[in-house]
Amino acid sequence: MRDKLKFAAVLAAVYVLIAGIIAVLAGLVWADLKPEERLLAAQVLDERVGGIVVFGFFLPFFLGFLINHLFRRYISAPSQLAEEIQLIVSANPDHRATPRGSAELRKVVRLVNELADSRQALQRDVEARIREASRDLEAEKNRLAALMSELAQSVVVCNIEGRILLYNARARQLLTQPVDKQSGAATRSLVGLGRSIFGILDRNLITHALENVHDRLTRGNMAPVASFVTTTPAGQLIRVQMAPVVSAVEQGRPEDMAKAASAPEITGFVLILENITRTIEMGSRRDALMQTLTEGTRASLANIRAAVEMMLSFPDMDREGHNRFIGIIGEEAAKLSTALNRTVTEFADSLKTQWPLEDMRGADLIAAAQRRIEQKLGLQTKTENVDESLWLKVDSYSLIQAFTYLASRLRDEFGVREVRFGLESAGRLAHLDIVWTGAPIGTETTMSWQTEPMNLGGEASPLSLKDVIERHDGELWYQIEKPRHREYFRLAVPVTHPEEVAWTVPVTGESRPEYYDFDLFHQAGQNPELDQRLLSELTYTVFDTETTGLDPSEGDEIISIGAVRLVNGRLLEHEVFEQLVDPRRSLSAQSIKIHGIQPEMLAGQPAIDQVLPAFHRFCEDTVLIAHNAAFDMRFLQMKEGPTGIRFTQPVLDTLLLSAVIHPHLNQHKLEAIAERLGINVIGRHTALGDAMVTGEVFLKMIPLLAGMGIRTLGEAREAAQKTFYARIEY
């Protein structure tokens, strides 16, 4: 419309210029006429004034028709041709330009279509040759994908920022959110390409393991493995083994290669997950059985033994005494039998679950504790008499928490400003000391420190210091060294002699195609400066809703939400969200005709306040995309008050982006856009079906926007806000 106004303004200016020239010439001629000639001219004009008025009345209509004809022929037609050519080049090679405009322009259109046919034939020929050349490579990839999918272990690969690059089916099954029995919401997998592993596993545990791996790499161990134990969202106990993905050493100067080889850069990590819940339970039950049998049978066995010894010592014992001892043996045997039967059914209720420990060099444990205390508390730390050769069997995460907790209590309650660590051998045990100088600590204080839950800087732990010590089968005591005016806590823990096992499996290859995307290794993490990020780099959630009607402010409700994720330029068909919602109100006949959802299909489905939290978790850390997003977002915004769920991430609207890309075309419905871009429309007017189509449309739009100089999220949002459709409100 603006181009047409500009064109009309130019023509009007030309018209005014010509009219002005004619008026000036007429004025000059009029000035040169003699009085009698002027009188004659006035009479002539007066006789023809009717014709002049008629001409002046119809002149604007003629000019308007002329302007519209010239605009469509010489301005609009070339602009539409340019948009169609861009569509052919960037998004839909099957599209062909429509002949319009002048005869010369129609010839250009025919040549453009012929050129597009030649280009498409060449592209198909090249693609066929590429497919033929890569057939063997594809077969290898498929074999590797099949192997990955059949692994008994759960495998997850992440980049250094914790974004998931690969996972297999076992990991998807293990890391699954359990069914909410109250809401009835379906079971949902928590893993997904581009999603953060920190939303599934404890960030502190992973960070701590990465620090241990980095330290071992720095010391020259090129195949370090760290491990820890945690729980899944379903409450299962899992052992996690972490191996680093290091950057390749590129060819170059020898000194640069030597430096890279000595301290390789960690670009990601591999997590191998093992469900050890059953193993731990079985081990705990076995240990409990042994303890119960030992404690429950000792007394009975002692009585039986005493009775037998008495009978052997006095062979001439009278029958009454002999029968009495026989009765004692029978009674104790019955007690022993009863105890055994009771143990078989009840022994597991009285003992705690064991916790697997990892082998770790004591010096590395102390170094990690020093870093933690200095960073968290600002205390100075030093070492003294540390035996570098000692290895300990520990849960390093909880033990470092315990050291930091002790240091914080010493700082806050006794003003200690420096602590020292020592480590020395004591036979099968190692003495790990935390030493300071200051006022003595009372016995009641040390006991309370051991039994209270550890709380450090807002990080609360359900464990107490005593729990941590018991977990390590160790002992902790407080001691004063009077000659040197020092005090220390000494922890005695078992030593171990681990076998160094090299990590021989190379961290390369691929899983099933829908479960991996290694290009994410090179992408930056999500951050508040999303507007500066390229559209091709972001992770998106494309969603759609079906509703009872079109007016959320009048009580219409959501009855279905469907969503799919876009990661690294791919639509992940297996990573979807689809949920029917009970609107707690009736459906209009008109809406049923559109979406086909019958009232009986919604009976027993969860309400919106139960569905929105799950949908919010699905789309967190992503940019939202919808077609006519103002409509869907209005329904979500109406639920912010009742549910407390707010969707604050950026939103892109394919309706507005279509108006940006094709400003000279009038059709911006989803079906019309999909047809222009060569996308098959399947499953329309279902929430997930519409989300799938919208996602494919957006992927086709990215190169079209780039051709217009719109490459970042901020540029796309700014361009969309300038369109006419951005003014629509619900």
Image (cartoon, rainbow, N blue to C red):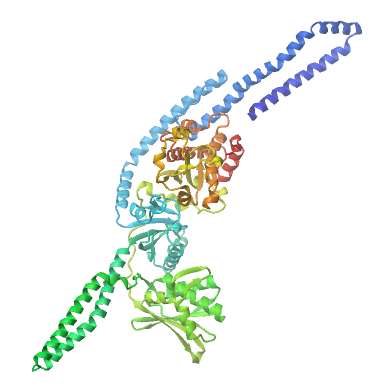
Spot occupied by residue 381 in the image (x, y as percentages of width and height): 51, 77
Spot occupied by residue 37 in the image (x, y as percentages of width and height): 88, 6
Spot occupied by residue 422 in the image (x, y as percentages of width and height): 45, 81
The one nearer the camera, 466 or 64, is 466
Which quadrant of the structure image shows residue 73?
Answer: top right
**Most extreme residue toward the front, as rendered?**
320
Point 53% across, 85% down: residue: 437
| Left/right of residue 7 with respect to residue 179 in the rendered view | right
Point 33% across, 81% down: residue: 428
Question: Where does the C terminus fall, quadrant-wise?
Answer: top right
When the figure is inspected, residue 537 is found, relative to residue 316, above or below; the finding is: above
Point 25% across, 73% down: residue: 343
- Count every numbered label the image shows and give the total: 0
Question: Where does the N terminus fall, quadrant-wise?
Answer: top right
When the figure is inspected, residue 231 is found, relative to residue 86, above or below; the finding is: below
Point 33% across, 44% down: residue: 138
Which quadrant of the structure image shows residue 157?
Answer: bottom left
Spot occupied by residue 511 in the image (x, y as percentages of width and height): 35, 50
Please say whether residue 645 is visible from this viewpoint. no
When the figure is inspected, residue 730 is found, relative to residue 357, above or below; the finding is: above
Please say whether residue 577 is visible from this viewpoint. yes
